[in-house]
Image (spheres, helix red, strand yellow):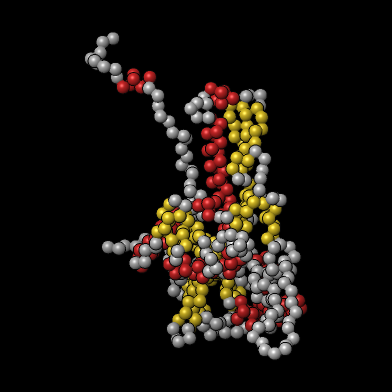
Amino acid sequence: MTTDRISLSPEAARQLATTTKTTPQMRGITPRYLLRALPWVDVASGVYRVNRRRTYVLGDDRISSHSDGGSPRVVQGELREIPYLRESDDALLGQLADAFTEMSFEAGQVLVQEGDLAEHLWVIVRGRAEKRAAGRYGDEALIQVVGDGQYFDLAAWTRDEPMPYAVKAVTPGVALRVERSALARLMERDEALRGSVRSYTAGGMPAPGTEAPIDLSGGHVGEVDLPSTYVDYEDAPREYHMTLAQTRMMVHSRVADLYNGPMDQTRTQANLTVQALRERQENLMLNHPDSGLLHNVPAGQRVQPRTGAPTPDDLDELLARVWKQPAYFIAHPRAIAAFGRECTRRGVPPVTDSRFGSPLLTWRGVPLLPSDKVPCPNGSGEAAGTTKILLIRTGEAEQGVVGLRPAAVPDEIEPGLSMRNMGMDRKGITSYLMTAYFNTAVLVDDAIAVLQNVEVAKYHDYA
């Protein structure tokens, strides 16, 4: 074969050359700031019990609804969120649930006027509304923004009193409401309910979420009789057991024997599997239905955004809920971008600080940690384009949020993560059991707060 070349071609030369190779890259690896930010408690017994001072029962301040033939209906068991209905039977709750009627509203519509008789108990099924009242000097004060599942005004409705505030819709939505006469009819037939309502209206029921009192005396002079007291504890403190992320890693003996240089195949496979386990760990620490942080925010620590998009006012409201040594915001990257746009619009760009080796946005000195594990669904549906922003205090000494892991596990390769050889099967494949044990614990209720229904698709024209 003839050729016009007068030197060796690069293609042929490459057959004799040695390549420089990278370790396998993995797009799914994230900084996992939550795992790095939480202080970790080594649990020797496998169970972490959070002992607390006795606290009066607190619900989730939500009354859920379901769709029945396209129309929303109250879930009757959810009516036990109302303090004096907590011990009521299902039959009574069913009758009250059937008395709710549907009402649609538009943005800007006044649902209730301040001073009007509270004829209805309202439950927001979908949408957002503002509670507003006349301020001390005649100006209008924003009391609270209420959203999906929240209800108002229980005290005025129960006592058949005037509304202490006005409620104005911020967005279009749907509500369910029940007349005061429905409660009156049930009270006529049920002596236990009458007693519970009387106790509630007389102030005999402690405020939900408050701690059992400690009797003290202060500011006195002379020789007075001092009160006697003791601190009561919860009868059934919450216990956190280790949850886990787990898989079997399989390596064929031929691969391990023949293709083990320059990189150890078993070690490389293990490294990538560990990364995947840690990613799943962070996901579960946020989203686990029982112990995930997003599912363990107390009722009084949930905030609705004023306009939908996350504004400096909204993050300030979170800081007002977790005001004792707040440590970190945790949010989806799109939520942080939306917050940045709102800051730009107001001319108050957030300060950037270096944490964990990366530049991070901060607000009032508190870093915003990005995590793609915070749900932020795209596409269609009621939750599309919305997410949440968490704020947490951290550490046992601060009565905050802590991460939990075993003090030691057999065949541990990282704290709380083991790699156990399960032997070789008849096909020459060695299997390794990879397990990460972990959990999170919220020590007291005010260690965490969440901004819900955060809209991330709002943009501004600066031209």
Furthest toward the front, the residue is: 222
Identify which residue, 311 or 391, lies in the foreground: 391
Identify which residue, 384 or 257, lies in the foreground: 257
Furthest toward the top, the residue is: 1
Q: Quadrant of the N terminus?
A: top left
Is residue 54 shown above or below 31?
Answer: below
Left/right of residue 17 with respect to residue 277 in the rendered view: left
- Dividing the picture into quadrants, the one containing residue 196 is bottom right
Is residue 285 shown above or below 400?
Answer: above
Q: Position of residue 207 (x, y in %)?
A: 65, 75
Q: Position of residue 272 (x, y in %)?
A: 53, 38
Q: Position of residue 145 (x, y in %)?
A: 50, 71
**Any part of residue 291 in sight:** yes
Left/right of residue 71 with respect to residue 139 in the rendered view: right
Q: Residue, x 47% and y 69% (percent of image)?
A: 316
- Dividing the picture into quadrants, the one containing residue 448 is bottom right
Q: Quadrant of the C terminus?
A: bottom left
Q: Residue, x 76% and y 76% (percent of image)?
A: 192
Is residue 265 shown above or below 226?
Answer: above
